[in-house]
Image: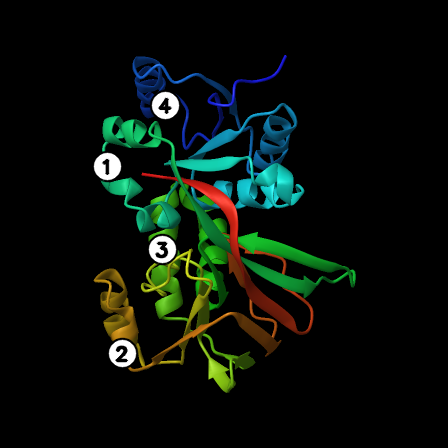
Amino acid sequence: MAVETTRWGLVYCPKKKNDKRWEHIKELLSERKIDYDFVQSENRDSVERIVSMLIQNGYKTIVVMGGDSAMNDAANCLMKEEKRVRDEIVLGLIPNGVMDDFARFWGLTDMDDDELISRLAQRRTRRIDLGCIRYVNREQERCHRYFLNCINIGMTADIMNLRRQTRRLFGSRTLSFLSSLVAMVFHRKSYRMRIRLNSDVVDRSVMTVCIGNARGYGQTPSANPYNGLLDVSVVYNPKVLKLFTGLWLLVTGRFLNHRDVHPYRTREIIVEESSRALVGIDGRLMKTPVGEYRIQVEQEVVNFLIP
């Protein structure tokens, strides 16, 4: 039997057991008479499988209650479909992650759940851009991966890696992030990079690079996912005192004011050399590409449910 076009397929990604917020969300959905079916993700690898199942079963509105990584999985699953299929589908988001940076761009994290569900129920949509990294892996296979928020190369990806390792020790996402951030302040790395952006070439030691389709965890604060462009912040290796200044500017939303941050805006970035720097995509570490790789923007390819 066909699914009603207004019925939500909801992917629930729990942060912890006995999530009282999820129970409240279900009450709000019922109060507003929103028809939905939900599937709870079992682990970080199950979101794409669930979204694929919802698409195959005819759901036209797919809402993810999760974080940046879960939304990344949903977007990548949708992009595997033919254009005529994905043009009929709208992706929505109920933020339930740690950073929720893509949600912050839309102001979703500033609303209480009552207001959030009320606005999503209005079903206002907008076509948005996705970034895409195209690379070759260790098996010499040509691969690609889409992103909603950002790609990080270098130190920020190192922090993601340390966070993953320290989380096993502390058992807390917040504590693991803070401890890994402090560790990186006193154990800074720089990478020899050669990057082409428009007519410019960056050929020098670089600490970190952020390519943002949206806010990029504060590193690309002027980026937005509907202008057909990517914002790029290239950060040279500052002294310790300047690094603390940079962290303060990052927190206060003035990251681009730091003298060691060099901003660009472009449709394509070619990374010709990166000294095997780690690469993170929407908050999750990915396998490091082999050799040269390209990062591009694909304009207005996904329908997004906006507040």
- Tell me whether circle 3 and circle 1 mark residues in contact (CB < 8 Å): no
Pinpoint residue 197: horizontal percent, then vertical percent.
51, 79
Task: Look at the numbered disc 2 and give the secondary structure of its residue.
Answer: helix
Around disc 1, counting alpha carbons within 10 Å, would you say few (fewer than 14), some (14 to 19), or many (20 or more)? few
Tell me residue 252's x, y (percent).
21, 62
**Residue of label 2:** 242
- Three-letter code for the amino acid on which mark 1 is drawn: Met
Residue type for callout 2: Lys
Residue at which label 3 appears: 179
Is label 3 in a helix, a strand or a loop? helix
Q: Which residue is mark 1?
A: 111
- Image quarter for residue 294? bottom right
Q: CA distance from mark 1 to mark 2?
A: 34 Å
* Quadrant containing the C terminus in the rendered view: top left
Badge 3 or badge 1: first in the primary sequence: 1
Q: CA distance from mark 4 to mark 2?
A: 42 Å
Toward the viewer: 173 or 211? 211
Q: Nearer the viewer, mark 1 or mark 4?
A: 1
Element class at badge 4? helix
Density class for disc 4 (Cα within 10 Å; few <14, some 14-19, many ≥20) is: some
The reply to whether dot 4 and dot 2 touch (C-beta < 8 Å) is no
Residue at which label 4 appears? 22
Circle 3/circle 4 CB separation < 8 Å: no
Disc 1, disc 2: CB below 8 Å? Answer: no
**Comes first in the chain, label 3 or label 2:** 3
Seen from the viewer's position, the closer of residues 110 and 59 is: 59
Relative to 127, 20 lies left or right: left
